[in-house]
Amino acid sequence: MKKVLIVILTLSVFLLGACSMEPPSWAKPSKKGEGEKIKIGLSVSTLNNPFFVSLKNGVVKEAKKQGAEVVVVDAQNDSAKQVNDVEDLLQQGVDALLINPTDSAAISTAVQSANSIGVPVVTLDRSTEKGDVASFVASDNVKGGQMAADYIVEQIGEGAKVAELEGVPGASATRERGKGFHNIADKKLDVTAKQTANFDRTKGLNVMENLLQGNPDIKAVFAHNDEMALGALEAINSSGRDVIVVGFDGNEDAVKAVEAGKLAATVAQQPELIGKLAVEAASDVLAGKKVEKKISAPLKLMVKE
């Protein structure tokens, strides 16, 4: 009899333990009833950049239009912080995640965490290396890099010496813009120097000062974003050299610099549109609709008219 009781008690403990392994309530996909507000989590690589502020504004405006709530977190260009931010958003019970990755590889674990509990993920401007993403909303960065190179060839001729300011290492935008640029530049230009400036204006200035000192024959610079381009422009102006600069994004300061004849050109994106399209994609996924794996926002080369 005692043996029977021991077996029963052992089974009871085992069953209770098994029940305790059930995922917590926040880790279960939410089921919204009709009229309930959708909660969207937005993780931005940095809000210390006008481009991503505009992207965030596009998300917030479209979400408000649809009656959805948005929780915004700023990774401050720290990939470890961004992973923690996304985990926090999941614990807050968001219905969908919009992620603008700081680092495309590092963010993969957070995307996979969302996948494991059924929260759909849409990436903006930059992709993720691993994990299931419902849709990737961005400009065609490869095409944009090619547009920049073509314009530089048109302005200074083939074979000219040029420099390249690269974005954050590991970011898909850095790889893609660089790839597009080199598709043309490796055949028609002489890329004598390239260095990362992490998409940052101050770093763009400092890196450009060093590149100018070591490469006196540079005739043009392609920067992977406008912040670096504007920093490079400041360094060039201080040096008194005649070097044209082409940026990427089309942010407000860059557009003003182009109109003033200071910045040669910028490959203009539409960050607000990217944000809007991302919210629409997330809403469609939550409604059970099919969405495109890649949604592209148009680009435009902006030059002084």
Image: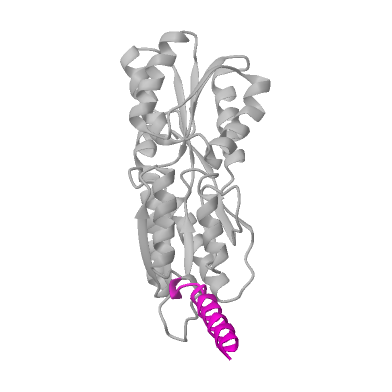
- Colour pattern of the rendering: one colour
Stretch in magenta: 1-26
Taking the magenta stretch, the answer to whether it contains residue 11 is: yes
The quadrant in which the N terminus is found is bottom right
Residue 242 visible in the current orientation: no
In-front residue for pair 86/45: 86
Quarter of the view holding residue 148: top right
Quarter of the view holding residue 236: top left
Name the residue located 34 percent from the left edge and 13 percent from the top edge.
Answer: 239
In-front residue for pair 114/271: 114
Residue 205 at x, y = what percent?
A: 35, 24
Residue 207 at x, y = what percent?
A: 40, 21
Quarter of the view holding residue 176: top right
Residue 121 at x, y = what percent?
A: 53, 61
Q: Is residue 251 left or right of residue 164?
A: left
Q: Where is 244 relative to 305, above or below?
A: above
Name the residue located 52 percent from the left edge and 43 percent from the top edge.
Answer: 300
Q: Where is 30 relative to 127, above or below?
A: below
Taking the magenta stretch, the answer to whether it contains residue 99 is: no
The quadrant in which the C terminus is found is top left
Residue 32 visible in the current orientation: yes
In-front residue for pair 197/78: 78
Residue 80 at x, y = what percent?
A: 42, 45
